[in-house]
Amino acid sequence: MRTAFSVFPDERRGGNNQQYPIEDAGLSAFSVFFTQSPSFLDYQTRMRQACGRDNAQSLFGIHEIPSDNQIRNLLDPVPADTVYPLMAELGDELYQAGYLDSFRSISDTLLLALDGTDFFSSEKLSCPCCLRAVQKSGSTRYRHTVVTPVLVAPGKEHVIPLAPEFVTAQGSASIHPGVEDVVFCFLRFPSGKIAHMHLSWLDPHKMRKMTVVGDQKMVVFDDMEPERKVTVYEKRAGPAGELYSGDISIPKISTHEPLRLECTYFLELIDGQHDRSQVARDGARVVRALEMLTNSLSA
């Protein structure tokens, strides 16, 4: 962790206070969650008074403990995605060590809890990416929203945090107030994958198309095509950025009415032919994403 924190961008210039290394600020911020104490400096001070010494150096390798304000000044300019590689590496190590096995519960699956929150809110400071909410007083509040996922398990006192998901939705209600006619959505997932959507019932071109870009192939689903609904492209990018293009295939897809298939599957669920718990979890994830997008729009 110290190595990862040491490459954080440091905004201090020239004569600014250089007493505290940027990695000590990062480790001190991490220690707040490790020790469950609001202030690491206060925690270490009380330990020193009670025991005659602290464990900042031995436990975290911290040479100088910054104050809470100094930690904020050093870490606020650091982009959140700077720590994503570290979180991914820690997650891989936990998986390889078998630690996540103890978190498996229903049908040998992992339970993911999601919580949406604001990580920035101001009436004076804003940026082009801010969500905007007009308050009753007439003032505008600028916000950034994030979905924070954690792995949980029944009976477990600890949780495993994952990289947060950033959700943004912008829309315009041109005809009916409060009902957006056009919406642009952006989602970033813990795995690093991203998705964007453009939705509009006013657009003169009726489209129901989805494009999935993978590391080996690309797939386009076009629901408006009567027969060529799915097209697979053997196209990918190499490690040096070079592009490879191969064959294009069109697999045969059933043309059954989607609503009929959905109703049939629902009846099969009632009859016990499928895993109801898995379907419920999938549905909950979809509803949660829709809720976050709706909240982003209303902001």
Image (tube, rainbow, N blue to C red):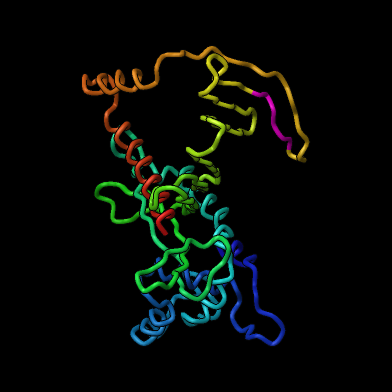
Residue stretch in magenta: 233-238
Q: Residue furthest front?
A: 175
Give whichever of 47, 296 is nearer the camera.
296
- Count of all numbered marks drawn on residues in the image: 0
Magenta highlight on residue 234 = yes
Query: Magenta residues: mostly which secondary structure?
Result: strand
State whether residue 74 is above or below residue 253.
below
Where does residue 116 sit, x and y in percent of width and height?
38, 56
Magenta highlight on residue 82 = no
Give whichever of 231, 56 is nearer the camera.
231
Give whichever of 249, 151 is nearer the camera.
249
Which quarter of the figure has residue 106?
top left
The residue at the point 21 percent across, 19 percent down is 271
Quarter of the image containing the N terminus?
bottom right
State whether residue 288 is above or below residue 10.
above
Would you say 190 lies left or right of 267 here? right
The residue at the point 34 percent across, 43 percent down is 111
The residue at the point 40 percent across, 45 percent down is 289
Quarter of the image containing the C terminus?
bottom left
Give whichever of 252, 43 is nearer the camera.
252
Would you say 223 lies left or right of 257 here? right
Where does residue 198 sit, x and y in percent of width and height?
53, 41
Which quarter of the figure has residue 2?
bottom right
Would you say 72 lies left or right of 44 here? right
Where does residue 22 sit, x and y in percent of width and height?
60, 73
State whether residue 36 is above or below residue 54.
above
The residue at the point 49 percent across, 42 percent down is 96
Where does residue 262 sit, x and y in percent of width and height?
34, 22
Which quarter of the figure has residue 45?
bottom left
